[in-house]
Amino acid sequence: GQRQTAGLLACDAIDEASGLAASRMNADVFWIHNDSGDSPRVFAVGPKGEHLGAYTLLGAKAVDWEDMAVGPGPVPGREYLYLADIGDNNAKHASVTVYRVPEPVVRADQEPVESALSGVEALRMVYPDGPRDAETLLVDPLTRDLVIVSKREPTVHVYRAAYPQPVDSVFTLQPCGELPLTMVTAGDVNAAGDAVLLKTYEGIYLFRRSAGQRLDEALQAPPLRLPYSPEPQGEAVAWSADGETYYTVSEERDGIPAFLFYYSRKAEPQG
């Protein structure tokens, strides 16, 4: 489907949107975070871009947050936010960190709040083949595995951190091959766990996952290219909670404000 505008992002503090996720426990709520230079916080946004709140992750640092996801975690039945501090333009960081924190309750009609989130866990990891820049975190809703896709190589690299990830020690990511894409800036897995989006500056790609496949294995099949109208510095993509639409968001650039966009899959070719 064609790009539709959900709304203008009402919160002025969201100026370099780099990660986007649709809540599955809070109806009509989206989570967004900024690129490097912001404090360790996430913003709750309504279905038309309304500002619902800013939530600081206690004890976390924001060196270069590049993607986020929602998904399951250690406590069964509870939803978590995952924030990926994995940006590394100069490939110099010894380790990278994914923060995991229980998702708070947010109402899509609430007045904006300023809040702090406790219970933050830091998952610290190193690449098996040296530091690199990455902007894509996938959380498997079926297994709780994490998958990271690098950004800058001519064929980007895929890495996996199997659940349960250690929270008290640095661990090494498992290499899972390469993809014939470059400049991958974001990704998301739908709630059912059978469809994965990867986004570059030019396109959005859909990978189907069959039963019994690991998430990283699903990325080895040829993807379907989906409709996408590139935005200024578009670095985020997310499935809707029901998987019927996908959302993108742009960074504020040259006086162009940031918008939340969506694309319906109703008219998408099957294949």
Image (cartoon, grey):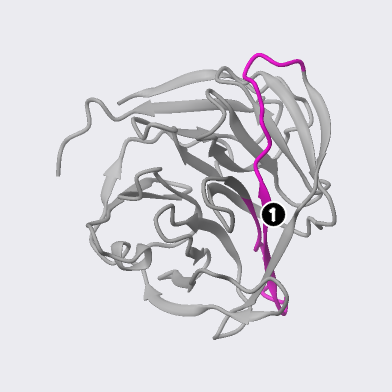
| Residue occupying the point 64% across, 21% down | 107
Is 100 placed above or below 25 here? below
Q: Furthest-left residue in view?
A: 271
* Mark 1, residue position: 65
| x, y percent for residue 63 | 78, 59
| Residue occupying the point 64% across, 26% down | 45
The span picked out in magenta is 82-111
User: In the rendered structure, which amino acid carries the disc numbered 1?
Assistant: Trp
| x, y percent for residue 249 | 56, 34
Tell whether 262 sits left or right of 107.
left
| Residue occupying the point 48% across, 48% down | 201
Quarter of the figure with the N terminus: top left
Q: Identify the main secondary structure in magenta.
A: loop
Image quadrant in which you'd find residue 4: top left
Q: Camera-side residue: 237 or 116?
A: 116
Q: Camera-side residue: 213 or 183?
A: 213
